[in-house]
Image (cartoon, rainbow, N blue to C red):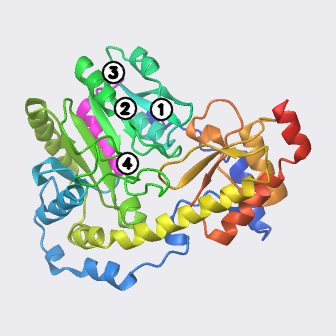
Amino acid sequence: MRFSRRTAWDVEETRLARALRERREAGLEILDLTASNPTRCGFRYDEAGILAALGDREALSYDPDPRGMLRAREAVCRYYGERGATVGPERVFLTTSTSEAYSWVFRLLCDAGDEVLIAQPSYPLFDFLAQIEDVRLVPFPLIYDHGWQIDLPSLRARVTERTRAIAVVHPNNPTGHWTRERRELEELCREYGLALIVDEVFLDYGMAAAHPVAKSGDKDGAPRSFAAGEHPCLTFVLSGISKIAALPQMKAAWICACGPERGLHEALERLEVVADTFLSMNAPVQCALPSWLDGAGAMQEQIRRRTAANLRALDAVLKGAPAVTRLDVEAGWYAVLRVPALGSDEDLAVRLVEERGVSVHPGYFFGFPGEGWPVISLLSEEEEFRRGVEALCGEFGEGQGLEFRD
């Protein structure tokens, strides 16, 4: 049997996955510093309210709209209105996930073999999403110098005649920094006729010590949604309730399209054809979306408290571990650590599982250059998080720290 090359992925079990499986099968504890599923992190959900929203009788009537139910799209518009952006429902398309949203935008913009420039480090799922659409991802570097920033000269140098879009995550996952180069990105897109794709799933999770996301009326220059303000280039803002309402299982997301009127009009028409081909959103979830968005604030507050507490605990532990440091984080659910590069990040992650019972993401998972970049989640329950960080830091004793400094 012959299969498509686009699905010729290596699906063999990795050394890290095997180490985790064997430890679980042995009944041994794993201190999980990779937790990303909020439904399993001990948060308090309004279970009755969440489930009641699925009981709307309107869901029994099939009234297909390629862009999604109007009242659901209007709820998305209110979400952006609270964040200083004026968005009409005609510019919103509902999807089952941000992954599907990427797929639709890639189909809209790219022919087979076309390129999308994407910031790196970043979430590894993008590679699979692009490959399955026959799109080539071309990474451009984020650099760390008193905070993260886009290497703009390197980005410009990567634009070719096959480039169709630039993609950024705002704030970035996993570095947790805000994309402050909006004007430069928009100017580059306008100059070369490119689209800008902005993933904002972590928009509402600014750290208290950094700038929170800007609301209407905040001073210019503070982090805010790319849906707000003027749009000199065609811009697609992606988000969904997986992060906004901490409901990854409910599968509701969207595309918000912005840009100059002429190009935007054609984009909306073409995107509607893509959406009409799939009609993927189910009616109960669309009916429930306004209620879930209205209740998202309570979940966000719990998560912000958890991530702030874990960040404080991490810093307290690191005071006694001079060989381990963390990079600045402004938003999101993750922290990036810098440790002595005494071997590969995969070797380190496997060793931490086998010898210390702690699970971390190796840096190569997100495209970090070189070694010594473990990434940990700030979402884990606080006691487990503290113990996990202590176990991680225990890997780097005084002698190893001196070797690193030399």
Mark 3–mark 1 distance (CA, rounded to whole Å): 22 Å
Q: In this view, does 173 lie to the left or right of 13?
A: left
What residue type is disc 3 on?
A: Thr
Question: Circles 2 and 4: CB distance less than 8 Å?
Answer: no
Q: Earlier in the sequence, mark 2 or mark 3?
A: 3
For discs 2 and 4, the disc positioned in front in the rendered view: 2
Give the residues drawn in magenta, as a range.
98-113
Outermost residue, front side: 219
For badge 4, the amino acid type reads Ser
Residue 163, numbered label:
3
**Which residue lies under the disc numbered 4?**
99
The answer to the question of whether label 2 and label 3 lie on touching residues, with beta carbons closer than 8 A, is: no
Q: Give the foreground label among 1 and 4.
A: 1
Q: Do the residues labelled 1 and 2 touch (CB within 8 Å)?
A: yes
Q: Look at the numbered disc 2 and give the secondary structure of its residue.
A: loop
Residue flagged by tag 1: what amino acid is it? Gln
Instruction: Indicate the position of residue 91 as horizontal and vertical percent values.
Output: 14, 47
Tell me the residue that label 1 is attached to: 149
* Residue drawn where x is 67% and y is 40% of the image: 373
- Secondary structure beneath dot 3 equals strand
Per the model, the C-alpha gap separating discs 1 and 4 is 25 Å
